[in-house]
Amino acid sequence: MKLITYKTATSGPRLGIQHQDQIIDAESLGKLLSYPIPSSMLELIDMGETAVSEINWMLQSLTPQQADACHVAKDSLTVLAPIPKPRKNIIGIGLNFTEHVAESARSLDTSNELPQKPVIFSKPPTAVTGPDTDIIHNAALTQQLDHEVELAVIIGKTAKNVRKDDAMDYVFGYTIINDISARDCRRAGQWIVSKGQDTFAPMGPVLLTKDEIADPHNLNLSLKLNGVEKQNSNTKYMLFRIGDLIEDLSTVFTLEAGDIIATGTPAGVGAGKTPPEWMWPGDIVEATVEGIGTLRNTIVASSQITN
């Protein structure tokens, strides 16, 4: 299923399902078919794969009249991040593509040796923003705003000490994250100030359940800045595959339903260009992952933001 979180002028965040050319309100569908479909993404993730299978079956037999009864007009809704308020920090993975390791060593003074274990950082829930929203450029903090297209993995159930061969059983689905980074905000090797500012985790536009992707390690991912392609690669070039990441992370701490892992970016970031290419107010950045869609955002100056 392609799942979204949306809002309208009269309702807060709600769970939606993309069905053919319509957006179906998930809770309304459940009421229509007497099945307890929740109104939020996190609640659905908590219900697990059985619920996904049941809803998929319902959608296959849904009549046009039933679909019309619980659809939401596209021009009346705003698509939000699939998980607008994660329960915990987003788990970021650094230096997970070989060519990005090399360009980071040249431009960011990181090691030019391939990591022997995943490089882990985090982004707070307040960094999350949705598609077609603004990314804040705070000139008082940064003059080096950068982009990173990434496949994000959504955990579906509690995972502790999971073997990599079993790790995919713990995946609920996938979305896109643009790991926005202020390169001049790293502090003594620590990345959270660089990575964790408000709006620095655009996410979406949809959450694709894992049954929709045959092989998450063979997906094209790319990024355009103002219509010009800057990044283009494939998830097959990950140093640490999803199973490796879940095995490593679940050894360090418990992963729980709804946790988000941003799996790393390929080469082509602004810091790696000669001269560097930073993002500025007015720029439009589009991150694309095959099968999931395109996540589009605009850079705005912090002075343009009103509370």
Image: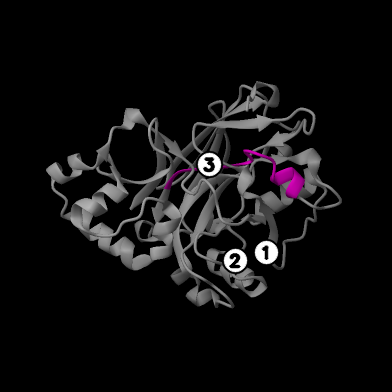
Image position, residue 176 (x, y; %): 51, 47
Q: CA distance from mark 1 to mark 3?
A: 22 Å
**Vertical position of residue 27 compared to residue 163: above or below:** above
| Viewer-side residue, 162 vs 241 | 162
Task: Look at the image and tell me in which quarter the C terminus lies.
Answer: top right
Q: Residue at x 40, y 48 (%)?
A: 291
Q: Name the residue: 53% across, 31% down.
A: 133
The colour scheme applied to this rendered structure is one colour
Name the element at disc 1: loop
Q: Given contact means CB atoms under 8 Å apart, are the residues at marks 2 and 1 in contact?
A: yes
* Location of residue 101 with respect to 46 vertically, above or below: above
Q: Position of residue 170 (x, y in %)?
A: 47, 69
Q: Which residues are magenta?
A: 192-206
Viewer-nearest residue: 184 or 72? 72
Q: Between marks 2 and 1, how big is the CA–CA gap?
A: 7 Å
Asked whether the viewer can see residue 45, the reply is: yes
In the picture, the disc for residue 132 is: none
Q: Amino acid at mark 3?
A: Ser
* Left or right placement of residue 276 versus residue 128 in this view: right
Q: Is residue 198 magenta?
A: yes
Q: Would residue 205 be counted in the magenta stretch?
A: yes
Task: Inspect the image, locate mark 1, and give the three-letter code of the amino acid beneath it.
Answer: Pro
Which residue is labeled 1 in the image?
118
Q: Which residue is mark 3?
A: 222
Looking at the rendered structure, the secondary structure element under dot 3 is strand
Which residue was labeled with disc 2?
245
